[in-house]
Amino acid sequence: MTSTKDDEDFWYSSEKRSFCFENNEVDQLFGVSKTDTDKLWAGISNTSIADGSLKSTNDYQPLKPMLSIISEKTLSCILATDKLQNLHPETTGLQPDITLRKILLGQPYSLEQYKSLVSKTTLLDAAIISGDGNAILIIILFLTKTLKRSLVQRILAERPDAVNVYIRYLSIRMQINEIIDILTMLGQPMDAAMKTLHIIIKNTRDPDRLLNKLRNSYKTQFSTLTDCKEALFVQSYIKLLEWQMVAKVIDGNEDIELNSSVLDCLKHACKGHWDLPEGKLMSPTILSQQHDVSPRQYQKVVLEVKAAAKEWDDVDRLLVTKGWLGSKKLQIHLPIEDVLKILHKNSAPFEVLEKYLKYVDNIERRLELSKNMHCFRIAIDILVQQADRTALMEYKTKLQPQSEEYFYAESALRLPSVKWKS
């Protein structure tokens, strides 16, 4: 049995001791101190236990090589870090460039050492110079946590690039009040109002909440802006949402949808509320007046709706008005050819097409349209008017034999009162 003195001799005689109980000397692992890492690498792979080390007995296993318990990559990182520290052994101050490099490379970093205002602004300026939005945002968020809000805003006011990054971040998080404060402080109330409007419209789905937010935005922001054209848009949008919500209540779940365009709403009003007096909210004329729908747009929408519904009497009331002595005259804001195209597209009867073809002033153009729309009577009458027998005979060959239009052309060719050119 080993004596107590032998145990003491063992611990104090070991050349590769792990710890000395009676002094504070640094461990000598593999003959290298902990801080002397430059010598560590050489002794890793071929490490062996010296004669005076711990004796190998049945109770002890040989020590394993270092690379068997730590990866070479990890060890390289440790050594590289030590070398980096050795490159600047005298530097104990702040190093914004090194900190920023770690942020850009995704390495561990700490911002706690940046305590003074100068050091924080220097770090932010370094991030701005790098042009990396993520790095800029990280520094800005650090400033917001460690500085007063008014001071952060003052710092950002002098750095437009940082403002743009921060505003984008606040927009994603929908922090409208902070956006308004910053942009207003920078003397950009118009930008603040427009950014708020964009966030509200993009992120609010519930119609009631959307309407309330728009009303509040107009009251607190747009109404105070002079010469702001967008203020009229917000007013119009609020009125449109109010109209759509009323339409939903009155008509139920029909084809009108919230956030539909003004022209889509006008189509809906023409379909279900055409005969309402002008003073009623759902009247098409009131809707068009509230949203400055031009006479041309209004007439086109109504014509498309009425032609699709085959309501030709309403088409006549829309396009034709009474003149002097009870005569009728055309009152349109669209080109007559556009009117004819809409009517033809919706399969208007020949008599309706012929009625409006007569308003095409250019006779050659009227003849071409008549042929394209298969209004044979108009086409034949024009050829008779031109006394062009050859053209009429050629046109007759294109008509279906024994049809109404074929016999009409034959009768025209036999008219004794016409002095044919050929």
Image (cartoon, rainbow, N blue to C red):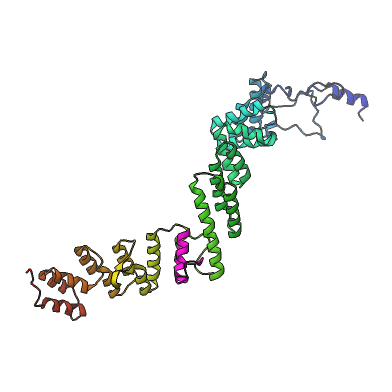
User: Which residue sits at x=57%, y=53%?
Assistant: 214
Residue that lies at the very extreme toward the top in this rendered image: 90
In front here: 23 or 86? 86
* Residue 118 picture location, percent across and down: 65, 25
Q: Is residue 43 above or below residue 157?
A: above
The residue at 75%/26% (across/down) is 49
Q: Write the start and end of the magenta stretch as one range.
A: 264-290
Q: Is residue 32 magenta?
A: no
Quadrant including the C terminus: bottom left
Q: Residue furthest front?
A: 325
Q: Nearer the viewer, residue 287 or 133?
A: 287
Q: Position of residue 45 (x, y in %)?
A: 66, 28
The relative height of residue 240 versus residue 40 in the rendered view (above or below) is below
Where residue 113 sits, quadrant-wise, is top right
Residue 372, located in which quarter of the rendered image? bottom left
Residue 169 visible in the current orientation: yes
Q: Position of residue 369 (x, y in %)?
A: 24, 66
- Residue 140 place in picture, x, y as percent: 62, 35
Q: Residue at x 82, y 35 (%)?
A: 59
Work out whether residue 189 or residue 134 is closer to the camera in this orientation and state it: 189
Task: State the quadrant of the N terminus.
Answer: top right
- Identify which residue, 11 or 182, lies in the foreground: 182
Tally the numbered discs.
0
Q: Is residue 108 visible?
A: no
